[in-house]
Image (tube, rainbow, N blue to C red):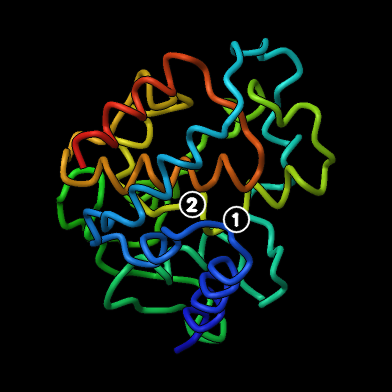
Amino acid sequence: MRARTFIAGLATMAVLTGCGGLETQSTDAKTTKPDSASISDAEKKLAKLAVKGRAPKTGFDRDEFGPAWADVDRNGCDTRNDILKRDLEDERFKAGTHDCIVLSGTLNDPYSGKTISFKRGQDTSMDVQIDHLIPLSDAWQKGARQWSATKRKEFANDPLNLLAVDGPLNGQKSDSDAATWLPPRKAYRCAYIARQIDVKAKYDVWVTAAEKAAMETVLSSC
C-alpha cells in the first residue's frame, strides 16, 4: 500500500482524536457530497468558530510556515509526494526512491471534475498542484501570526489541509477564502466547505463575517 497506508493511518487518527468527521473526504478526491451527519457536524463547528475581521498581512512569508513540503512525518517522502500518492491513480514512481517520487499518474480533479494526466517535469509538474484548502496567507491573517513555528509547519503540511488539484484553478484561487472563491464544480462545494471548517476548527483559525455567511450558504444547500 506504500505511503497510502501511512496517510490512511493519519485519517484514522484524526477521526479518533476528534479532528473532524470529514477526514474520509480528505483521502478520496472523488467524493463529492458528505452525508447529512457530516454536514450537521460542520454546521456545529462553524457556529463555534470565532468571527473577527481580517488582520493585516504584514510580516507574512511562506518561510514562516517552514520549508515547502518538508518530510514532517519522517517517512522518507516530502509532503507533496505524499499527497500526490494519496490523490492520484495509476502512479508510476522514480526507481530507487522506495515509491516516493511520483513520475506520473491520473488526477480526478475535485475542483473542476476534469481528468488530468500528471507527468513530472519542468514544464508539466505544475499541471497538478497541491492546494492548501485554507491558504497560508489567509491563515496568517486569521490567527497563524501568533502561532509557534512548530504549529505553522504542522498546519502547512497537514494532509487534512492539502489536496491535489488542477494547477490553473489553484492559481486562480490564490489566497482567497470562501467569501471570494469556491470550486467551479458545484458538486464538490459541500465537501470543500465542510473540510475547510474541519481545518479551521482543528487549528482555531477564525472566520470573517463574510466568509462565515458564504460557508453557511453552501452548507444550507447540501
Residue 217's x, y, as percent? Answer: 27, 26
Is disc 2 surrounded by few (<14), some (14 to 19) or many (20+) residues within 10 Å? many
Is disc 1 surrounded by few (<14), some (14 to 19) or many (20+) residues within 10 Å? some
Is 178 above or below relative to 18? above
Q: Classify residue 210 by image quadrant.
A: top left
Question: Which quarter of the rendered picture does the N terminus lie within?
Answer: bottom left
Question: Residue 55 has which mark?
Answer: none
Check disc 1 and report its element: helix, strand or loop.
Answer: loop
Q: Classify residue 24 by image quadrant.
A: bottom left
Residue 157's x, y, as percent? Answer: 62, 54
Is residue 186 rendered to the left or right of residue 11? left
Q: Which residue is mark 2?
A: 162
Is residue 125 rendered to the left or right of residue 50? left
Question: Which quarter of the rendered picture does the C terminus lie within?
Answer: top left
Is 205 above or below relative to 155? above
Question: Residue 158 has which mark?
Answer: 1
Is residue 75 rendered to the left or right of residue 166? right
- Is label 1 in contact with label 2 (beta carbons under 8 Å)? yes
Residue 3's x, y, as percent? Answer: 52, 80
Q: Residue at x 81, y 49 (%)?
A: 150
Q: Nearer the viewer, residue 38 or 30?
A: 38
Is 215 above or below relative to 5? above
Q: Amino acid at mark 1?
A: Asp
Check disc 2 and report its element: helix, strand or loop.
Answer: strand
Residue 201's x, y, as percent? Answer: 58, 43
Q: Amino acid at mark 2?
A: Leu
C-alpha span from label 1 to label 2: 7 Å
Q: Classify residue 6 by image quadrant.
A: bottom right
